[in-house]
Amino acid sequence: MVDTYRDAKAGDAPIIEVAAVTKSWPREGGGEVTSLAAVDLTIRRGEFVCLCGPSGCGKTTILNLIAGLEHPSSGEVRVRGARVEGPGPDRTVMFQESALFPWLSVRSNVAFPLEMAGVPKAERDARVERHLRMVHLWRYRDAQPHELSGGMRQRAALARALVNDPSILMMDEPFAALDAQTRDVLHGELERIWVETGKTVVFVTHNVREAVRLGDRVIIMGTRPGRVKRDLEVSLARPREPNDRDVASLSAVVERELKIEIEKVIREELDDAWTPAGNGLPRDSHRGMGDGI
């Protein structure tokens, strides 16, 4: 296989800058626990960047800092060169759960942020229709959320996230709760929408193959405290298929990078008797019975 990745290097002026950011939280009983330590990260306009790493490495914290939902303990986050002080209409977040209002129709759910922004009804209706057609849900515009499948609810959530036309879309494991077949379909749909809209996407995932399939770059996070361990640029042609050989090969590279960090987390959470699978497994004294017969 040709070299399908390289360490990412600065190119165009970044739209997002995470500069020497540390995030700490008060520890019950005194002291602090550090979630992120001196993280530096830049994201260029229109990039699809995936954050990948073990639980507790600070992936969601980075997303919340960019969104302005949290503030760094030190360092700063900048969007278009301006320090992020709080949420803004140029940034929106899509979560693992669709968070649709159960008492509203699909159309009303998507229209909700436009209503809050005071968008006139005629423009609101046109934008809702455009985005529901974009995610192929126009036929279900009058359905209630409970009438939709999990994948359809996430499509509706995506339409709602895009309807205000943010330049930056942040996605926190949006497909983690879906079955593999539905997830594969939505990967293709998300890639198509990203190409059509030119949004900058910051995508958090535990799924390595998902990160490699979707990302221009895969940010591999180290943990305890969280940091950027490696920044890989993915140069595979698009569109990418989930079972593509090069996607699988690069996924294996990322998984090897993550293995040490994942084992570190497990060692901290479990007792001293834990060993990685295959290391020090006790031999069943009966398993060899009959050898040589």
Image: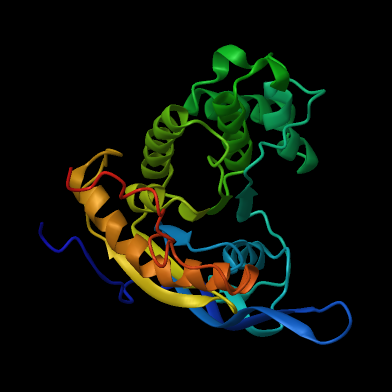
Of residues 240 and 221, the one nearer the viewer is 221
Above or below residue 92? Residue 113 is above
Residue 15: tell me if it is visible.
no
Q: Residue furthest right?
A: 29
- The quarter in which the N terminus is drawn is bottom left
Image location of residue 147, percent across then percent down:
68, 15
Q: Residue furthest left?
A: 2
Above or below residue 71? Residue 111 is above
Image location of residue 201, percent across then percent down:
48, 54
- The quarter in which the C terminus is drawn is top left
Of residues 71 and 81, the one nearer the viewer is 71
| Quarter assignment of residue 89 | bottom right
Of residues 140 and 218, the one nearer the viewer is 218
Image location of residue 124, percent across then percent down:
67, 30
Residue 114: tell me if it is visible.
yes
Above or below residue 96? Residue 106 is above
Q: How many marks?
A: 0
| Quarter assignment of residue 36 | bottom right
For the point 35% across and 48% down, the residue is: 287
- Judged left or right of residue 201, residue 114 is right
Above or below residue 21? Residue 290 is above
For the point 26% across and 49% down, the residue is: 248
